[in-house]
Amino acid sequence: MTSLIDIHSHLLPGIDDGAQTIDDAIELVRYAVAHGITHSVITPHIHPGRYDNNSETIAQAFQCLQEEITRQKISLKIAYASEVRISVEMMQLIEQNQIPFLGTLQNKHVMLLEFPHSHILPGSEKMITWLANRNIKAIIVHPERNKELQADFSKISPFLKAGCLLQVTAGSLTGKFGSKSQNIARLLIENNWAHFVATDAHNLKHRPPDLSEVKQYLKHTIGETQTRRLLFDNPWSIVKNKF
């Protein structure tokens, strides 16, 4: 497996809590290449009231980074989408075509959907139904880091039954987010409940864009074929049209 695809990262400069400057972004890009990533879909937060991004702001930041990558002849292939915090406001953004989707799967739009870290909002299941009625499939990001799911992971079941997919953070599997996140992340992997592993990279110090370490863990735990499924096959099936 020579190609590794990262479908969740925060490398665009100055628009959320990831890279703050173009120099930060380029350092992260170079680190990603050095640690096995060949394709990166960069997914800034859309979190109404905190990170008020939309298709336009994200496209502008992406263009800035793409030009610098091209100028410096860095080999990473990049595209953009968004990580969307579940909220009432996101419904209007979707209706206004202001959310860049991750890609498509089975003729449905696919989006990265983030729950609050502390709990699952009341009405979240209804939101999944609302999305499905608009031909949108949700990938729930880092469920292993949600405090309510850490306390009772069976609460994810309605979302799986509704057709949601799950994306585990690479750093959770290697222990960087603590034992609770690690235990649930590994449970998801070993039971074949996770569909993607991605970096959720924000910075070099605490959350770097690294898939090489987790690739070795996955190969040892679930074998080459399943590792390829999580790090290439499943991501590529959704994002290939972006590249």
Image (tube, grey):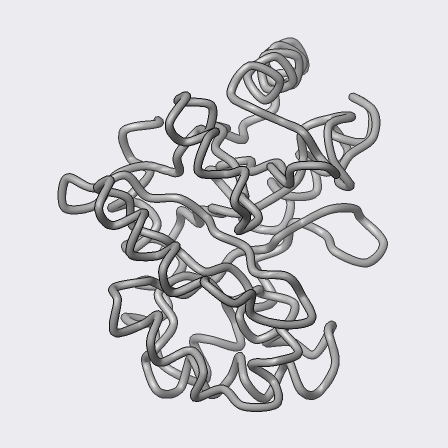
- Taking the spot 51% from the left edge, 20% from the top edge, the residue there is 55
Residue 205: image location, x then y, percent? 85, 54
Name the side, left or right, on which 168 lies relative to 145: left
- Taking the spot 67% from the left edge, 29% from the top edge, the residue there is 52
Image quadrant for the C terminus?
A: top left
Taking the view exactly as shown, the residue that stands out farthest to the left is 106
Residue 242 occupies which quadrant of the picture?
top left
- Taking the spot 72% from the left edge, 38% from the top edge, the residue there is 28
Of 123 and 219, the residue lying toward us:
123
- Taking the spot 61% from the left edge, 12% from the top edge, the residue there is 60
Position of 65 relative to 193 (above/below) = above
Position of 74 relative to 17 (above/below) = above
Residue 225 occupies which quadrant of the picture?
bottom left
Position of 135 relative to 14 (above/below) = below
Name the side, left or right, on which 144 lies relative to 101: right
Residue 9: image location, x then y, percent? 60, 44
Of 97 and 193, the residue lying toward us:
97
